[in-house]
Amino acid sequence: MPISYPSALPEREYLFIDGGCLRSSTRAMCKQIFGGENAYEPLISAIAAGSYHKVFYYDAVPGRDHGEAQAAYEARVRPDHERFAKIRALDRVHVALGYTVGPNRRQKGVDVQLAVDMMTHAFRGNLTRATLFAGDADFVPLLRSLVGEGVHVTLWHPPQASEDLKAAADSTRLFQFASDHHCLSLDGQQSGFRAIGVEHSRWPEDEGITRFTEKDGFLYAGRWDGGILDVWRHDKNTTWRRVSLSAPGADLETALTALDAIHSWGVKDIGEAFFEPAAAA
């Protein structure tokens, strides 16, 4: 009888998120682009979307301050527990919590639990690929061990991530506004931005646009309508191109700033008064 070989394991990818790194990366991104680190928050449902079979989120509950009354402490951390509860309610998403100690709010029990879980799932054959959102060099031995076990490891990282950590992964993915703007949220429920890529478009006049301006050799037209920003651009050698950005809850200045960070069209410099408030009837 012919020899029967076991079939290859099906591809299974898990996502592991260092919540502290994600939150600090989001704050840094918002400060750089919008001038305020609390402008937007991470949207875990968007970050967890895709082909991941399971998602594991690791974070820490703030510790009780010295001399702080229990009632005051519980009131202070209630928003954190509510945030963790919403994350737990997401499909395929699991939350593990450590705690913070000391004046610098250093996390305890988070990195170790994340590393143990990744290695356990790898040794049990639960996954063939793993994505880790992190930036700390403390994870270098973990990534080297996983890669040595045959797991394909992708590091999703902030710009300031350790070079050694990036080198230890099989592949890397930069956490940046241009590609990950949909992972930010104003209310924790929906994406703060949804962009449609550059596409050829019919003439803006056919869309009811009447205002035009010229800048750096390009002719621009624009419309701002209920959280939807549409911008057209044209030069002598191309047809009109149009980009659209959904920015629910944002003002026009924020939407223009976001669009420039995604497409680099320089539309914020044109001025808010140029953009028509709505399409003509």
Image: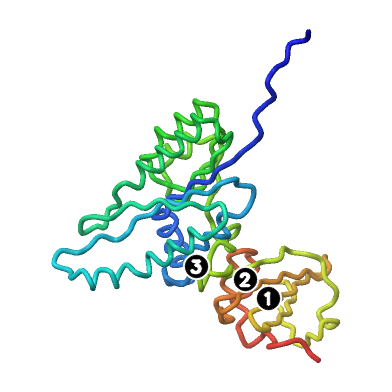
Q: Mark 3 or 1, which is nearer the eye?
A: 3
Does the CB distance between marks 3 and 2 fall below 8 Å?
no
Q: Nearer the viewer, residue 128 or 38?
A: 128
Left or right: residue 55 compared with residue 212: left
Front: mark 3 or 2: 3
Three-letter residue code for mark 3: Ile
Q: Earlier in the sequence, mark 3 or mark 1?
A: 3
Asked whether the residues under the numbered discs 1 and 2 touch, taking CB atoms below 8 Å apart as contact, a structural biologist would say: yes
**Residue 219 x %, y %:** 75, 76
Secondary structure beneath label 1: strand
Between residue 22 and residue 67, name the one nearer to us: 67
Instruction: Give percent across and percent down for residue 162.
Output: 41, 43
Badge number at residue 33: 3
Q: How crowded is the residue under tag 2: few (<14 C-alpha within 10 Å), some, or many (20+)? A: some
Name the residue tied to disc 1. 215
Helix, strand or loop under label 3: helix
Residue at left offset 18%, top offset 70%: 69
Alpha carbon separation for disc pair 3 and 1? 22 Å
User: How far across and how far down the image is residue 17, in percent?
Assistant: 47, 50
Residue shown at the point (47%, 34%) measured from the top left: 168
Quarter of the rendering occupied by the C terminus: bottom right
- Residue wearing tag 2: 266
Mark sitting earlier along the chain (3/2): 3
- Residue 84: image quadrant is bottom left
Mark toward the start of the polypeptide (1 vs 2) = 1
